[in-house]
Image: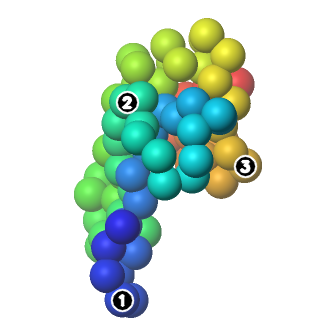
Amino acid sequence: MGRRHRSFFRLNAMDSRVPRNGKAIEELGWYDPNAKSAEKQVSLNRERIEYWLSVGAQPSDTVSDLLKRNGIGQ
């Protein structure tokens, strides 16, 4: 998401059998690396992320690092 020179990422729960651009099961938050303040950089739904991790969801390496920085996850 975003535009040129202004990245913006959504954190979604996806089914691994669905194509990369397929429909998300649930939107779990967003990440804006260009935001000036730390509290405006990340918005995560902690309760739902912990639920998805508890039922076996596997975060990508990048998402795993983002979750660790925010005190969520393994």
Image x and y of residue 44, in percent: 37, 38
Q: Mark 1 — residue?
A: 4
Q: How many marks?
A: 3
Using a 10 Å C-alpha cutoff, classify the residue at mark 1 as few (fewer than 14 neighbours), some (14 to 19) or many (20 or more): few
Q: Nearer the viewer, residue 70 or 21?
A: 21
Q: Mark 2 — residue?
A: 26
Tell me what residue is drawn at x 49 percent, y 54 percent. 21
Q: Which mark is residue 33?
A: none
The quarter of the displayed image where residue 67 is located: top right
Using the numbered discs, state the Cα–Cα distance from disc 2 to disc 1 in whole angstroms.
Answer: 26 Å
In the picture, the quarter occupied by the C terminus is top right
Image x and y of residue 63, in percent: 60, 47
Say which label, 2 or 3, has the lower sequence index: 2
Q: Is residue 19 above or below residue 48?
A: below
Q: Are marks 2 and 1 in contact (CB under 8 Å)?
A: no
Tell me what residue is drawn at x 49 percent, y 33 percent. 13
Is 56 situated left or right of 10 in this image? Answer: right
Name the residue type under label 1: Arg
Image x and y of residue 1, in percent: 36, 67
Tell me what residue is drawn at x 57 percent, y 39 percent. 18
Which mark is nearer the camera, 3 or 1? 1
Using the numbered discs, state the Cα–Cα distance from disc 3 to disc 1 in whole angstroms.
Answer: 24 Å
Q: Mark 3 — residue?
A: 61
